[in-house]
Image (cartoon, rainbow, N blue to C red):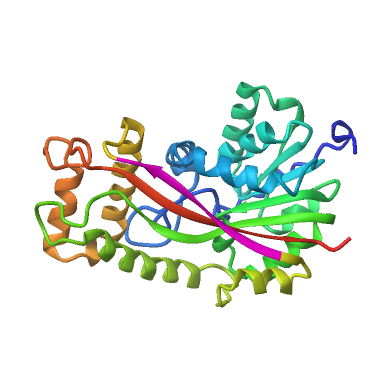
Amino acid sequence: MAQEQHEPRESRDQHDRRTGHHGHHHTHGHGHGTDIDWAEMAHHLESQAELFTPLYERALAWLGKEVTEPGLIVDVGSGPGVVSCLFAEMFPGARVVAADGSEPLLGRARERAERLGYADRFGTLVGELPGSLQELDYPADLMWAGRSLHHLGDQRAALAAFAERLAPGGTLAIMEGGLPPRFLPRDLGFGRPGIEARLDALETEWFARMRAELPDAVAETEDWAALLTSAGLKHARSRSFLLDLPAPAPDRARAYVAASLGRMRDTLGEDLDAEDRATLDRLLDPRDEASVHRRPDVFVLAAHTVHTAVRPQ
């Protein structure tokens, strides 16, 4: 298949910020609500994905053992294109299309591809997902949705739409689930021990509200193998990948931890008790020796799970 002859058509008149992007914390937004301004989060999304590059590289290497020579790879909900460009690096014979609902984020993806030397085989597709995938000129041999599916209201219908745009024998890979990240010891030396576990519980409630408020939201049992099978795909399998950045965390990891906790403070702070709010405020105060900016025991430990299935020949 000659990718150079098949440029994707770009539908630039569609822009839906409800579409998901690469992200590692569910608490993406600002304020107490669940609306998400993706363009405003561009830098944070890029820094997250760059920090998690070792995890993504292991996931892509695992995919590459079965998807050996894809002609077209589509990154669904690509955001600013960090992982899209990793696909371009991992599969040098493939054309990569970054598909997203935010043109500002896709602009950053194109700039990254140009900077890294992939522009001649890199395209973007803007529009509401999954419908915009109909604009692709030919089916995908590998379609990836990295923590973006949960931002689409009807996940079962979205998976069916993804499957329809796969070539016979093509692979759909979704990254959903895993374990909540950990940044700090259970006992910080102040406040009640276990603040991250309590933040997890609040974030789970926030995530449920976010899902319920999506257009056409449908509650689903998150049995990803069953959902992939219901989309007409076969050979479902799953594997989890670990990011382990031990203490003392490097500066960019500290910046990610501070940004993540800051967003949780903005989004979940009203639901925390006074002691936990005070603890979080100390963790975020760069002047405080006990803050994540300065304490020596900050780390990043996270696990993400990839689920794949294949369209029958």
Residue 225: image location, x then y, percent: 65, 70
Residue 94: image location, x then y, percent: 77, 36
Residue 307: image location, x then y, percent: 62, 60
Report if residue 126 is visible in the image. Answer: no
- Horizontal arrangement in the rendering, residue 140 relative to residue 297 (left or right): right
* Above/below status of 81 relative to 261: above
Q: How many numbered marks are there?
A: 0
Residue drawn 64% across the image and 31% down it: 110
* Above/below status of 77 relative to 238: above
Residue drawn 69% across the image and 70% down it: 157
Residue 24: image location, x then y, percent: 45, 51
Main SS category, magenta section: strand
Residue drawn 57% across the image and 33% down it: 108
**Residue, far left:** 190
Report if residue 285 is visible in the image. Answer: yes
- The magenta-colored residue range is 236-246
Quadrant placement of the C terminus? bottom right
Q: Is residue 240 magenta?
A: yes
- Horizontal arrangement in the rendering, residue 23 relative to residue 101 (left or right): left
- Along the viewing direction, whichever of 73 and 64 lies nearer the viewer: 64
- Along the viewing direction, whichever of 218 and 238 lies nearer the viewer: 238
* Above/below status of 116 relative to 231: above
Quadrant placement of the N terminus? top right
**Residue, far front:** 65
- Along the viewing direction, whichever of 234 and 201 lies nearer the viewer: 234
Q: Is residue 148 magenta?
A: no
The part of the image, by quadrant, that contains residue 153 is bottom right
